[in-house]
Image (tube, grey):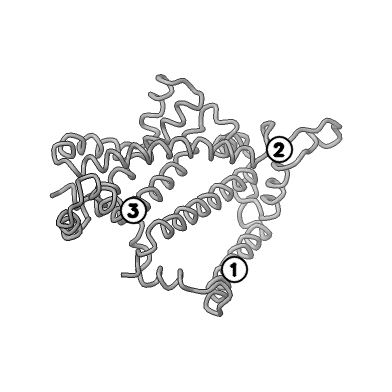
Amino acid sequence: MTQVVAGQDIASQHDTHEPPERRALIRRLPVGSPSALRHWGIRLGALTVFLAGWWMVTAAHIVEPLYLPGPGDVWRAFVRANSWHQVAPGVPREVLGEQNYFLWEHLVASLQRIFVGVGVAIVVGMLLGFAMGSSKSVATMVEPYLNFLRALPPLGYFSLLIVWFGIGDTSKVWLLFLAAFPAVTVATLSGVLGVKRDYVNAARALGASRSQVVLRVVMPASVPDIVNGVRLAVGFAWTTVVAAELNNGIPGIGGLAYVAGTQLRTPLVIACIIVIGITALLLDSVIKWIGLLAAPWKGRA
């Protein structure tokens, strides 16, 4: 019984920040309605206030530029990282971007690692979650190891992965897989165990076989929990990308941020952080949209 409660708690962490009725209300707002315009106007106003405060702090030299450069410096670093530029003033030779890659190429390299690592984690995590939810013996055997892996910080075993798989992409993909895998498994387990027995009994009473019950009842009912698990998994993996790219992480947005930090190029570091954050928001929005398509009934019952 302990694993059921724990699984439900972990899988539902991401939904506790917004009440279901508010999420449903936001989804129903027409794009051009006054409420939607007000919603986005508030966000735009908050962003404007933040940028103005940032600019005033740096313009007044309250903080040294080495520690906090101004928005203009960060923007110039971003543009420089995405264009051809001179090696140094007065030197005719030009180089592209940073570390011989444009910043968007660094981002694409990181996303490729994320998609491979998290993609495999989703497949394996769902299969194991369904197996644990369907068999108490499997759940009893696997649960301690799953919780052990979930409690480990990624940097705790990254050096071991480098020893096993080298400093190439293989060790990075393994790290991202291990960071994402437990969240998907626990969420899938929670979804399977949360299916109402009335649904299963009704399907069996109508003559459905075991495979039909799994495919037509259990899997659709588990979709919302699985989507939440994928959101958590992608978040965990994306926050791990910098750690994954500490060694031989070029090209890679996390590796670029690390190299720029060692060179005390704070504007470029902040530009990388902003790109990482915006990308995370976009990924989460895409996963939420896919979840609404896969489970349109969620939040409407």
Q: Where is residue 225 in the image (x, y as percent from the top left)?
A: 32, 53
Q: Mark 3 points at which residue?
A: 223
Which numbered disc, 2 or 1, marks the residue that appears first in the sequence? 1
Label 2 or label 3, whichever lies nearer to me, is 3
Label 1 or label 3, whichever lies nearer to me, is 3
Callout 2 amino acid? Gly
Disc 3 secondary structure class: helix
Q: Name the residue under label 1.
A: 44
Q: Quadrant of residue 109?
A: top right
- Residue 261 visible in the snapshot: no
Q: Where is residue 8 in the image (x, y as percent from the top left)?
A: 24, 54
Gap between marks 1 and 3, in whole Å? 33 Å
Q: Name the residue under label 2.
A: 97
Callout 1 amino acid? Leu
> Which numbered tag is attached to residue 200?
none
Q: In this view, does 204 lie to the left or right of 78?
A: left
Disc 1 secondary structure class: helix
Residue reaching furthest front?
207
Which numbered disc, 2 or 3, marks the residue that appears first in the sequence? 2
Is 169 in front, or is 124? 124
Q: Position of residue 242 (x, y in %)?
A: 50, 38
Q: Please determine whether, in this image, residue 157 is positioned above or below residue 200.
A: above
Residue reaching furthest bottom?
34
